Image (cartoon, rainbow, N blue to C red):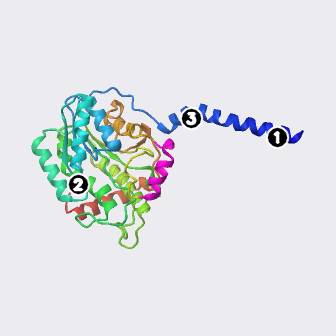
Amino acid sequence: MQDCLGCALALGLALALPLLVLLAAPRFRKYIAGGKCTSTAKMNGKVVVITGANTGIGKVTAKDLAGRGARVILACRDMVKAEAAASEIRTKTGNQQVIAKKLDLADTKSIREFAKNFLEEEKELHILINNAGVMMCPYSKTVDGFEMQFGVNHLGPFLLTFLLIECLKQSAPSRIVNVSSWSHRSGRIDFENLQGEKSYNRSQAYSHSKLANILFTRELARRLQGTRVTANALHPGPVASELGRHSTILIILGKMLTFFLKTPQEGAQTSVYCAVAEELESVSGKYFSDCKPAYVWPQGHDDETARKLWDVSCELLGIQWD
């Protein structure tokens, strides 16, 4: 009798479990998707630069802002993909002011050429979104000899922002949006091993560079007080994108766990929120995730390290930014 009862319970559970999963799936997906930017702000007359906007959340962000009427410059390394993305966005939004421009964050000459051409062709810049980045790549160096993740994720955006900062000030109110990551929690800024000179771990190097984004944003916001230019950072969430292409494990996990990852559309929401939300017009030096303020780990509040990183970055890039 007990065996029969046990079999019946097991059978009932086996039949009920798929139903429970099916019923819970929509709610779980909503949780994974996170916050959604609900702002209806229009961007007519606004000029936007988005790095790495030919794919992933950068492309979705570009499409959203173009749909709001902005003039959007896709600043990308791969011009074939960039031109294709720009064409697609123009077609889908009806906005013909979507332009692809060459920018390679692993080459300071390319960054300077992009900025020079932009300042010659454009009179204003209202939003700069430092979106492009690399993740967990094997040890390699940029054209200028910087460790790749530190160079592309931190030094590249740092230099680009420096070169465009006066235009942003003259166009104020304007915004700088830096795409960071929750992985800054395991980041450390070790000035004795800043670029993996003594030891290199691709995962740790990524976390260090994302912490650098947080500290850069914090110090930049402090220096921009009174200019009506804001600077904020964000975590887009775990997104199904090409960012993890350098890690076989991430590629495999991404294919296996797609249900647990945000789509690029979902992952772009906080970038869009930081760029357009009316309530953030005077908010600066903050960190967001799921379209709301998020927790910053203690090392992201270290003002002394932020100032020293600023000075070291200027020295490495050969610039003076007071």
For mark 2, give the secondary structure.
loop
- Reading the chain from its start, which is encountered first: label 1 or label 3? 1
Between label 2 and label 3, give the one nearer the viewer: 3
How crowded pointer 2 is (Cα within 10 Å; few <14, some 14-19, many 20+) is rated as many
Q: Position of residue 63 (x, y in %)?
A: 29, 35
Residue furthest to the bottom in view is: 198
How crowded pointer 3 is (Cα within 10 Å; few <14, some 14-19, many 20+) is rated as few
Q: Where is mark 1, residue-wise? A: 6
Q: Residue at x 24, y 48 (%)?
A: 76
* Residue 27 seen anywhere in this rendered image of the structure: yes
Between label 1 and label 3, give the one nearer the viewer: 1
Q: Quadrant of residue 105?
A: bottom left
Q: Where is mark 3, residue-wise? A: 25
**Residue 96 as seen in the image, left or right of residue 15:** left
For the record, the magenta segment spans: 247-261
The image shows a total of numbered marks equal to 3
Q: Position of residue 321 (x, y in %)?
A: 21, 55
The three-letter code of the residue at mark 3 reads Ala
Between the C-alphas of marks 1 and 3, the distance is 28 Å
Mark identifier at residue 104: 2
Between the C-alphas of marks 1 and 2, the distance is 64 Å
> Which secondary structure dominates the residues rendered in magenta?
helix
Q: Position of residue 132 (x, y in %)?
A: 31, 49
Between label 1 and label 2, give the one nearer the viewer: 1
**Residue 260 as seen in the image, left or right of residue 161:** right
The three-letter code of the residue at mark 2 reads Asp
- Reading the chain from its start, which is encountered first: label 1 or label 2? 1
- Reading the chain from its start, which is encountered first: label 2 or label 3? 3
Q: Position of residue 75 (x, y in %)?
A: 23, 46
State the residue in front, 158 or 201.
201
Q: Residue at x 24, y 50 (%)?
A: 78
State the residue in front, 311 or 112.
112
